[in-house]
Amino acid sequence: MKIIAFYLPQFHTFKENDEWWGKGFTEWTNVGKAKSYFKGHDQPRVPTELGYYNLKDSDVREAQAQLAKEAGLTGFMYWHYWFGNGKRLMADIFDAVLESGKPDFPFCLGWANHSWYSKQWNSDGTSSNKLLMEQTYPGEEDILMHFTYLLKAFKDARYIKIGNKPLLVVYDPISLPKFYLDRFQEMAKESGFDGIFTVCYLGRPEMDKDQFIAKGFDMVMYQRLDKELSPVLKKMGKIGKVVKHAKKYMHGLIRGVTPYAMDYKEVYHNFITNKEKGKDVAPMIIPQWDHSPRSGRNGMILYNSNPEYFYMHALDALNVVKDKPADRQIVFLKSWNEWGEGNYMEPDLTHGRGYITALRKAIEKFKE
């Protein structure tokens, strides 16, 4: 069984962030200015053991890997930003991991193939977007350039493989042209692998996995943070979405919370469904979530999250993979260090190492 955590290589300064958000900006900027919007809302979040770290510090990366090992994680999935024709962002951290050979901890890549926008959050939970960096798919020359880079990672002894196939996650499987996927597979085989084991990320629970399996992906994973629209609201189109937002506002008023806040203990069982029992679906576990540092009171918030509920959530996921073929016993953890989304495992002032201990406890229980 493999449990692989998403890893955000963001916590350091780089030129584009300075230009877009002001000199010295990192994700810690949002984390530090976060506000508590209702009674019991745990903000701001304060890191403890690792502090407000700079990921360019190799000692920090070593300490992260040690904590991940203590949690029982198989490895990190580093988000990888390739916008076309060699244009990358936040590349320094993974490049340093690759070139230095440290930390000695398994990894794979997740291609975050989406455009970057400056978002202005609106009262109905939507956002007005200004394009900052566009995701493009220029064609054959770009494919060759991109695969040449990926191959350096694939050949690293630490790279996570399923059989003789390097594991690669794709964030947006819809926009990715099929010929990109096909050419990557061909070039991987030409390079001595049996292909690439590809997993795609599905951000909406109503998305049909079969179309992505038919496109060439080996597995899918679902993010189930938000419930899908009911059949009745779906038929209503845009009006249905407005009704959904109105219901969320009423929910918030009644409970004394913000519009998009949900009680973790009431919803975590929804994150793992019967679909996750399929051999081509990898379950996703979510320790906690709070988007308000980025999007204010209109952010999605899971309140009442704590390590004990996460322990039970992790057991749900482990139980759905136990009867799958060995090479399909894969669980993704969202995320290791997405502090700006309140979505992390690292020690903080509220829970200490609680989430790390909870995951280790769930793994040990599963092995009994």
Image (cartoon, rainbow, N blue to C red):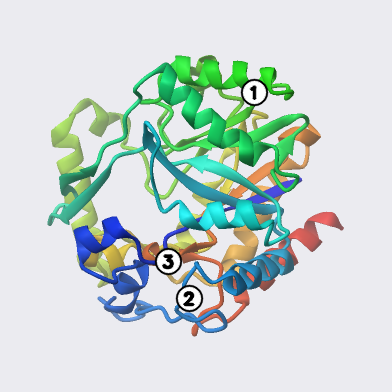
Position in image of residue 356 (x %, y %): 65, 70
Where disc 2 sits, the SS reads: loop
SS for callout 1: helix
Task: Report the residue marked by disc 2.
Answer: 53
Q: Nearer the viewer, residue 28 or 330?
A: 28
Q: Where is 117 relative to 13, above or below? A: above
Q: Is residue 216 above or below residue 5?
A: above
Query: Which amino acid, mark 1?
Result: Ala
Q: Which mark is residue 188?
A: 1
Quarter holding the N terminus is top right
Residue contact at pointers 2 and 3, CB within 8 angstroms: yes
Q: Which residue appears at 48% of the width and 76% of the height?
A: 53
The kind of residue on which mark 3 rests is Phe
Q: Amino acid at mark 2?
A: Tyr
Residue assigned mark 3: 11
Residue 125 seen in this snapshot:
no
**Quadrant in which the C terminus is drawn:** bottom right
In the rendered view, does 233 fall on the left or right side of 99? left
Q: Position of residue 64 (x, y in %)?
A: 61, 69
The residue carrying pointer 1 sits among few (fewer than 14), some (14 to 19) or many (20 or more) residues within 10 Å by Cα, namely many
Of 135 and 19, nearer the camera is 19
Horizontal and vertical percent position of residue 66: 70, 69
Check the image and report above or below for 97 versus 224: below
